[in-house]
Image: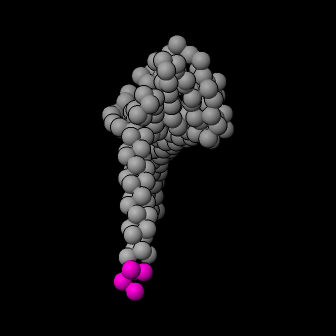
Amino acid sequence: MTNKICLFTIPLIAALGVGCATNQDANVNSTANQAQATTSPGPDNSEIATTVNADGTRTETRTFKDNRRISKVTVTTRNGVKTVKVTSKSGEEKVVDTTEDVLHATGDKVADAAGFVADKTKDAVSEAGDKAEDAKDKTVDTTKKVGEKTADTSKKVGEKAVDTSKTVGEKSVEGAKKVGSATAEGAKKAGKAVKKVIP
């Protein structure tokens, strides 16, 4: 029985040893194929990630944080040949043949090189908003002018009413004085006439 266990165990151990060696080789190959990655800030509010594979392929990916036309640019250099791929905000990818340094140019220049146009809907909405703002400002200005003219006219009407009231008041006072004087003179004459009648 011990012989049977030994005969069975020896091939099992050998198989495990071969399996472990194969696994180690796979890990070594996997580590060799992994890329070394570095990340740095880029111009125009972007970030550039650079990786180099074991075979020497260099991939530089510039990701734009807030460009409205493009999301990223990928420059792959393999055996001295560069390939530039630009990805729009909507996910459309284009391979671009350009002399522009896409890792340092503005996002709009890169988008122009790729032929990605700005979203006309957003521009139209923005323009409509600007026109509405202008119209609102003109309405406020016109309302202020109308209000000022109304206030000026009210002042003029008020001043004329006051002037007219003064004139009417002065004439009434003068008339009252004349009437008072005439009444007083009439009373005096009437008093003299009464005295003459009474002996």
> Is residue 44 visible to us here?
no
Residue in the foreground of this view, choosing between 112 and 47: 47
The relative height of residue 130 versus residue 191 in the rendered view (above or below) is above
Residue in the foreground of this view, choosing between 88 and 192: 88
Which quadrant of the view contains residue 2?
A: bottom left
Quadrant location, the C terminus: bottom left
The relative height of residue 172 versus residue 196 in the rendered view (above or below) is above
Which quadrant of the view contains residue 37?
A: top left
Give the x, y percent position of residue 9: 39, 74
* Colour scheme employed for the rendering of this structure: one colour
Q: Which residue corresponds to the image point at 52% horizontal and 13% vertical from the top-left?
A: 99
Q: Is residue 92 left or right of residue 1?
A: right
Secondary structure character of the magenta stretch overall: helix
Give the x, y percent position of residue 180: 42, 53
Give the x, y percent position of residue 175: 47, 47
Quadrant location, the N terminus: bottom left
> Is residue 194 visible to us here?
yes
Give the x, y percent position of residue 134: 57, 34
Q: How many marks?
A: 0
Residue in the foreground of this view, choosing between 20 and 54: 20
Q: Which residue corresponds to the image point at 42% horizontal and 70% vertical from the top-left?
A: 12
Q: Which residue corresponds to the image point at 55% horizontal and 23% vertical from the top-left?
A: 83
Query: What stretch of residues is rendered in magenta?
Result: 1-5
Residue in the foreground of this view, choosing between 101 and 56: 56
Q: Is residue 74 left or right of residue 188?
A: right
Q: Residue furthest top?
A: 99
The relative height of residue 4 versus residue 36 in the rendered view (above or below) is below
